[in-house]
Image (tube, rainbow, N blue to C red):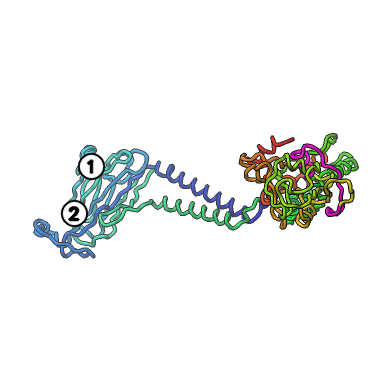
Amino acid sequence: MEWLSAENLVAVATAVLGVVASAVMVWYERRVPRRKRIGYRVQLDVPIGDGQRSSRTSRREGWFDTAAGMTHASMVLLRIENDGSQAIGRDDYQSPGNHGLTVEFRERTILGVSVTQPSETSHLLEHFTEERGFGYQDGTLRLPRVPLNRGAHYKLLVLLSGGRVGDGIQLSGDLSEGDVHRNRSATPDDKAPLFSRAARLITITLTLCVVALAVIVVAQDDSPPPIGCRSGTLTLTGSTAFAPVLREVAEKYERDCADVGPRVEVDPHGSTAGIRDLAAAGAEAGNGSPPLVVLSDGPKPGGLPELRGNRVAVSVFALVVNEDVRLRNLSTTDVRRLYRSEIANWSELGGPDLAVHLVSRDAGSGTRQVFQRRVLGRGEIAHSSVDCVHKDDPTAPVIRCELDSTEQVLETVADVPGAIGYSEHAGASRAKGLHRLDLDGEAPSVDAIEHGTSSYPYREIEYAYTYGRPPADSLASSFLTYLTRGNGQDVIRAHGHLPCWTPAGMGLCARDTP
């Protein structure tokens, strides 16, 4: 995915919006409340009289029924509070006259006022005197310049006549470097808000940001892009056992990097032959690194210091026998006797009365070299048949043939009764007409090897060789990164190999060497 793609631009814009929204909220919560602020709340506004013009009804008894002016009376409870972060002194009030704040009740007339205060702040009551501006006339209530510490408050219970309950009540006044504002209050019949307006705004904004990012993640392709697509032509050769992996990874790389149009060709013809081709191509290229990568089942032979190896995967191989050979397990000792031509009939190992046919790979095969190194502990004997059915050397104790590819080995073992051969594990699992053999009771299992519960011997590191170190901006370097650390890892695992760049694979690839 390119940096200027639509997905990236939307994701970045959404992230920036979230950060800006958070910053604005922090500024609002930190900067604005630091001003001197007086807030007021109407905590009660209820009718008292029967004739009150209100949607509420009431019934009066006693003094409420006999006192003058009670016919259209109402009662209001006001809370005046310092909800800023600074204390407010008498000199901070800027209203003309000696009072500090003014409350207007519009069409209602004030009948009386009571100041209510908790005992711990009862000292505030001394400010509510006529000399300091406390008083009322008609529907106007004047409040003195009451000093309020941060969070301090006082309440006013006001008895009114006339007008309507719920008519707008307005408190006004001027503060030095501050303001007077109305706060929402939970009246007896109202449910308190769960969030403030600012909290609701920031919550909605951040939620929209998260949803937008989630949509981007779900909508876009969840597979990681190749690391640094490059154009040009690259040839992959070497192991036929690893060829199915290479073909699929090559197709994915070309598809993912279609914008630059790379061409990756797969031409496997054996690990040893591929190593020779790479050495020759490198010598011919001089100081450069040719566009050629060789996959080898196991490390390269000695004497080729200019070839640079990259561990790709742990490959597991398996011995396979024709379906008519009903044996499921062989000891390593029996396998060695078979390949030394000491056993000519399966009945000698408790199997059916069928002649043994050894179906092997050619001398340049990495699969064969791993088999010789890991299982036999020596080289195989000379072949005695071309078609794997008829004996060309009458003196040979068993029929043994050599084929050019893993596919040919699997097809021949499935077709020839009594045949035994070897193959890359995943290919053997998919083949028909044959089955795999356990060695010394250990099954050829990638999962068991990955979890450290198996000592199965027929396995090897798959190497990718280049001539020297290819340039960082070359197609060879880009493809190797894609194969070992990019989308190629999923393909490697899907074909029954363990990628070396996984947590378990790194340990195995580091120590599981001959």
Give the residue pinned by disc 2.
Answer: 159
Between 190 and 346, the residue placed more toward the observer is 346
Q: Choose top left, top right, bottom left or bottom right for residue 432.
A: bottom right
Task: Report crowding for label 2: few under 14, some 14 to 19, many 20 or more residues within 10 A (C-alpha).
Answer: many
- Residue displayed at 84% across by 44% down: 363
Establish if 19 lies above or below 75. above
Depth check, front residue: 464 or 213: 464
Which numbered disc covers residue 256?
none
Inspect the image, locate mark 1, and give the three-letter code of the amino acid beneath it.
Arg
In the rendered image, residue 280 lying in the magenta stretch gets the answer no
Q: Are marks 2 and 1 in contact (CB under 8 Å)?
A: no
User: Is residue 372 magenta-colored?
Assistant: yes
Q: Looking at the image, which residue is at 16% across and 65% down?
A: 51
The answer for how far apart the CA atoms under marks 2 and 1 are is 22 Å
Residue type at mark 2 is Leu
Q: Earlier in the sequence, mark 2 or mark 1?
A: 1
**Secondary element at image label 2:** strand
Q: Is residue 114 left or right of residue 342?
A: left
Quadrant location of the C terminus?
A: top right
* Residue 302 against residue 323 in the figure, above or below: above
Q: Name the residue under label 1.
A: 132
x then y, percent, for residue 475: 78, 48
Query: Looking at the picture, does residue 34 appear above or below residue 410?
Result: above
Judge whether residue 309 can be spotted in this image.
Answer: no
**Element class at badge 1:** helix
Q: Position of residue 373 (x, y in %)?
A: 77, 38
Where is residue 195 drawn, in percent x and y?
38, 51
Question: Residue 238 or 170: which is nearer the viewer?
Answer: 238
Asked if residue 52 shows in the view, the reply is yes
Residue extent of the magenta highlight: 367-390
